Amino acid sequence: MRIITFFAIFFIAVWVNAQITITQTSMPAANDTIRYSSVSPAGLSLNIQKKGTSQSWDYSKLVASRQDIYRYASANSTPYLLYFFNQIGLKTADSLGAGPVMLKNIYSFYTKNSTVFKQEGIGYSFQGIPLAAQNKDDDEIYQFPLKYGDSDVSTYNFRFVIPGNILTFVQAGVRTNVVDGWGSIVTPYKTYSNVLRVRTLVSGTDSLITLFGRLPIPRRQVIYKWLSADEKIPVLEITGTETNGTFSANQIHYRDKYLGLVSPLRPRAGFTVSKTSGFVTVDTFNFTDRSQPFATSFNWQITPTAGVSFVGGSAANSRNPRVVFRQAGLYSVSLIATNNFGSDDTTVPNAISIQYGLSTQYITTESVYFYPNPSRGEITIKESGNLELFDASGRCVLQRFVVTNERVSVAALPEGLYALKLNGRKPVSLLHY
């Protein structure tokens, strides 16, 4: 009897000591940088049914198809300090959307404490203004302490209104966590002798709301996560759907080291330009992004930078910028194209040749004959007489009689430098852009 009691106590002690408990110390913190690899689940047998005590999971044969890094930052170091003070930010995208609803610099924000790790909302920039969409009901991803046999149920509610009230996106539902196993796991990165497995069911509805009504989209997602006390993200995470008890994976991530992988979906930077030579302030150069397969953010670098002006509402981060050069010389052009799968860059040395042309020395902020100069679409003539306007080739593009203080539209003319004559006197240069 004593022997039986001894072994019972011994095995209970071993069983208790073998388990781990996950707390907030095993969650990401500001300034953590964590690399992970992604795997295509096609054709894989994942043996997801294994659960219970003292399990041994072997995923050592997974083959990474691409890699990325989670970079966590303090909210105080992001543009969204006023919305998420002291919280933990994770940048999820450089840009999202297109045209009038282009959002940039997108972060998700998290809070952790002794009882919970939860997501509280997102920060994004719209037309250069930092904004936020905060959860009406925070999404509690884990509740602490977390150990084998634990389970918890929580609700979430997130509402995002696209600026201009064009569209509202709502996510609402229930998150259920069950710690259904513990043991060891082998991944291509390393062997972990002590992990917990958490099965998460996210069940709810995603809704698109427009002026025409509400479109509900059911959401039912199953996530298996293996957690180690020594890592800040799951050592393995498999996401998918479950139908009639059959699980189908659609996403696999695991903690990993740098492998030097390049995703086939990373853009290959490329561009064209409307011309390769022109005159100071006269010619407008149209740059067109040709990156493949696609890019979501752009960084144009034209050197030397002095004398380079982006016009027509474009900028160095526009997809297809327009440029006027205000100094003669040779200019090199570089483009960095980026999407969620990586970045690429290309440089064309001495791509643009610029010369001095039509009487640029006569350009002033205000001439004897008219104002303003430069013009953005309209000039006011200061005296009556015969008006003639010539382009850089010497062709007369406008001829008419004007009266004192008459407004003349030049908005239909291409951007560039023109010569304006009034009553046959010496021409004065007009810069229009």
Image (tube, rainbow, N blue to C red):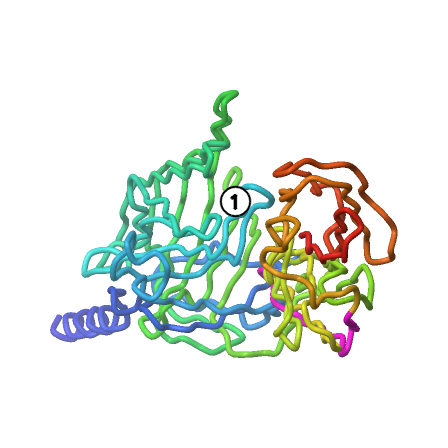
- In the depicted structure, whether residue 302 falls above or below residue 112: below
Q: Where is residue 215 in the image (x, y as percent from the top left)?
A: 51, 26
Q: Where is residue 400 in the image (x, y as percent from the top left)?
A: 79, 37
| Residue 314 visible in this rendered orientation of the protein | yes
Front residue of this view, candidates 218 and 200: 218
Q: Secondary structure of the magenta portion, mostly? A: strand
Which stretch appears magenta? 340-356
Q: Position of residue 279 (x, y in %)?
A: 78, 66
| Residue 292 visible in this rendered orientation of the protein | no
Front residue of this view, candidates 99 and 361: 361
Q: In which quarter of the image is the N terminus?
A: bottom left
Residue ID at (35%, 55%): 180
- Which quarter of the figure has residue 304? bottom right
Residue marked by disc 1: 241
Confirm whether the magenta stretch covers residue 172.
no
Q: In this view, does 289 lie to the left or right of 193?
A: right
- Which quarter of the figure has residue 87? bottom left
